[in-house]
Amino acid sequence: MIYPASISRLGGGGGSERRVLCANIMGVTQSIVEPEKDARLRHHPSILGDPDETPENPDAPDNGDRKPAEGLVNELESRLFKGRKVMVFGQITDKLARDVVSRVLALVDESAKPIQIYVNSPGGHVESGDSIHDIIKFVRSTVPIYMIGTGWVASAGVLIYLAGENKMRFCLPNTRFLLHQPMGGVHGPATDIDIEARELVKMHERLVQIIATDTGQSVERVRKDTDRNYWMSASEAIDYGVATKIISSIKDLK
């Protein structure tokens, strides 16, 4: 026979409580003691994931002015948005593409004032780069888009950067650019591997056409240059037609 479980509470030292679950199953009583919560875990955001809690620093004065890191990030994002600045930093992924596209479309809907897009990326997912590239071209006739390269602009990052009109593509003095052919890997039957290999060749040819069109270089030269890694300094990128002007001050955009 199975009896319903009963719950009792036991007092602990220091006013704390522990719950004891007693279950009588077929005449055998089992007790399960719920462990006491360690008070130290209340201030460990990686465990509780509570955005309202931050790690305590016993040496820091409690002046009530501290803000959660999440709040500071949100404030920074808000300032960038109000300043009509969009950041394309890091690996190009579908998540980054969604974030950038959403910001660009929201800013276009807000007003026709210029948008500054800062690019510093090693590249990444080509189709995600395609999405950002196409959206920028989609709206640039309505809103001026300033493309600013910084750090390094490589692979799919170059694809995004070239979405800006030629006269609106700027870079900072130490920016480096990298062109190369797409890379990929696949596992499976030989037939699938062959299909993917042919798709990579088609993708490479499509990117060659885009780069040639947006830089003014011949298809033959771009095809040859992208066969291996092709690095360019800021001044070399201007000679190639990737960038238009090296800027050292934000005033140079005006």
Image: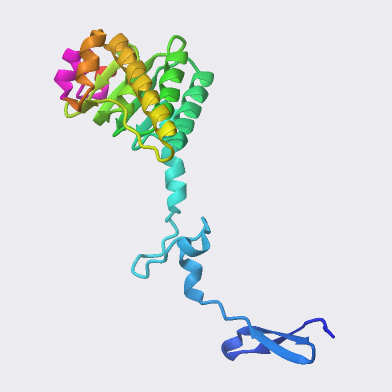
Q: Residue at x 51, y 77 (%)?
A: 38
* 25 displayed left or right of 236: right
Q: Which residues are magenta?
A: 232-250
Q: Residue furthest right?
A: 1
Location of residue 20 in the rendering, given as x and y in whole percent from the top left corner:
68, 85
Report the residue at 44% width, 18% height from top: 134
Question: What residue do we see at 20% from left, 17% from top?
Answer: 224
Residue 102 among magenta residues: no
Quadrant of the snapshot with the C terminus? top left
Q: Is residue 166 visible?
A: no
Position of residue 12 relative to residue 150, above or below, is: below
Closer-to-camera residue (36/62): 36
Is 241 part of what is drawn in magenta?
A: yes
Q: Residue furthest front?
A: 190
The answer to whether residue 204 is visible is: yes
Question: Which residue is at the front of the view, 176 or 211?
Answer: 211
Examine the image and state in which quarter residue 222 appears: top left
Q: For the point 25% across and 25% down, which residue is it?
A: 180
Between 14 and 201, the one lying in front of the other is: 201
Residue 140 location, quadrant: top left
Count the marks: 0
Tell me if 178 is positioned left or right of 39 in this view: left
Question: Does residue 203 sit above or below 185 in this rendering?
Answer: above
Position of 211 with respect to 79 (left or right) is: left
Where is residue 130? Give x, y as percent.
42, 23
Image quadrant in which you'd find residue 176: top left
| 124 lies left or right of 39 | left
Provide residue 240's location: percent of width, then percent of height: 19, 14
12 versus 186 height, above or below: below
In the picture, the quarter occupied by the N terminus is bottom right
* Image coordinates for residue 111, horizontal then vertical, percent: 50, 17
Which residue is more in the foreground, 131 or 223? 223
